[in-house]
Amino acid sequence: MRLGVTIWGFDAGAAATVEVAVQAEQRGFDSVFVVESVLANDAVTTVAAIAGRTARITIGTGIANIYLRHPTMLGIAATAIDDVSGGRLVLGLGPNNETMISRAGFTWRDPRVALRETTEQVRVALRGEAAPGLRPPMASARPVPIHWAAMALETCEAAGRHADGLMLYLCTRERYRTAVARMQRGAQAAGRPADAVAVSLLIPAFVHDDLATARQAAREFLVHYAGMAHYAKTFAASGFAGEMDAVRVAGADRAAAMAALPDTLLDEVLLVGSPARCRQQLAAFGEAGVGWALLGPQRVGPSSLIDQARVLVRDLAPR
């Protein structure tokens, strides 16, 4: 199993994220990705900084939001980062959600259409092509892989048709297998081999020797997603329909909503507990077919996210 680290950049800060990336490379991790939140941080510039401080590790955006930047400029940035890094960039793209995009003043449109059109325009820039009358950008020395973040199975299938990779998040083992199958169906329909599309799974991690403390932090984290319709729909389809109904009924009663999240759900989509327990859970993901796991350290108790990132890099390192 390929093992990487994903840092929530808006919570960690750019300088600290770069330092964790350096540590992750030293400890044998395969890759480092940076999460971006709408108008809260810039994953692209942080990944550029990581490129200058690392030499081996795959680096990437997890994700760069497709509504926030002109695709040509995103392609130009990708060319620059890939050049500086010696060909180590993965450009992860995604839409986030309609509420955040609209609240930030951007226009939401069909995310699959936006993903496809952004990908096409980024690839034009990577090839060094320009609109008539404009100076062409420098072409990338290689085809930078473009990965799509996806929740809906329809988007997974579209990734099989159009993207170089599929980035999954908060998936149960069964949901992971279903999503990969749909991606492969899309690839087959487009005349592409199934292995032409890389698949990664981002797994939030709550590493702490006290299981109760880790579970409390995990519930505080997961209740946010359980309250969002598209995540709740996915969890319900994965065997937790009754629990999602209880979260919906709880409404603004956060304590009741958290109480509705069972330990079994936490263990299906997160890593929770001591390093030894987290390794056991990670092995279970591997047995379910996950070939590239991205571990996302999260706050536990009074520890900051960056403190937890250092713990994860130290205690769950491949070597």
Image (cartoon, rainbow, N blue to C red):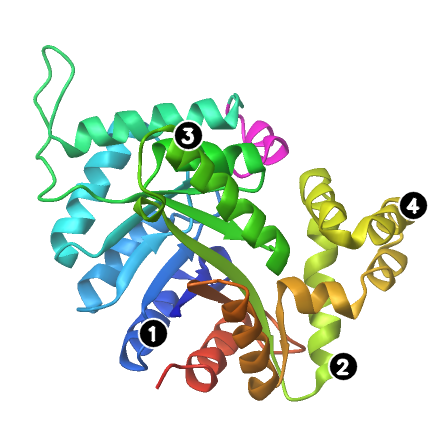
Identify whether 144 is placed above or below 2.
Answer: above
Quadrant where the N terminus sits is bottom left
Q: Position of residue 160 (x, y in %)?
A: 40, 37
SS category of the residue bearing label 4: helix
Identified by mark 3, the residue type is Leu
At x 51% / y 21%, what residue is drawn?
107
Residue ID for mark 3: 115
State how far apart marks 4 and 2 are (Cα). Answer: 25 Å
Identified by mark 1, the residue type is Phe
Residue range of the region highlighted in magenta in the rendering: 95-106
At x 48% / y 62%, what residue is drawn?
290
Residue ID for mark 1: 29
* Residue 12 horizontal side relative to residue 78, left or right: right
Q: Residue furthest top?
A: 132
Looking at the image, tell me whether mark 4 or mark 2 is earlier in sequence order: 2
SS category of the residue bearing label 2: helix
Q: Position of residue 248 (x, y in %)?
A: 86, 44
Looking at the image, tell me whether mark 4 or mark 1 is earlier in sequence order: 1
Identified by mark 4, the residue type is Val
Please state which of residues 103 and 85 is positioned toward the viewer in this rendering.
85
Q: Say if mark 3 contacts mark 4, CB within 8 Å.
A: no
State how far apart marks 3 and 4 are (Cα). Answer: 34 Å
State how far apart marks 3 and 1 are (Cα). Answer: 29 Å
How crowded pointer 1 is (Cα within 10 Å; few <14, some 14-19, many 20+) is rated as many
SS category of the residue bearing label 3: helix
At x 53% / y 22%, what residue is drawn?
110
- Quadrant of residue 170 within the rendered picture: bottom right
Quadrant where the C terminus sits is bottom left
Identified by mark 2, the residue type is Ala
Residue 249, numbered label: 4
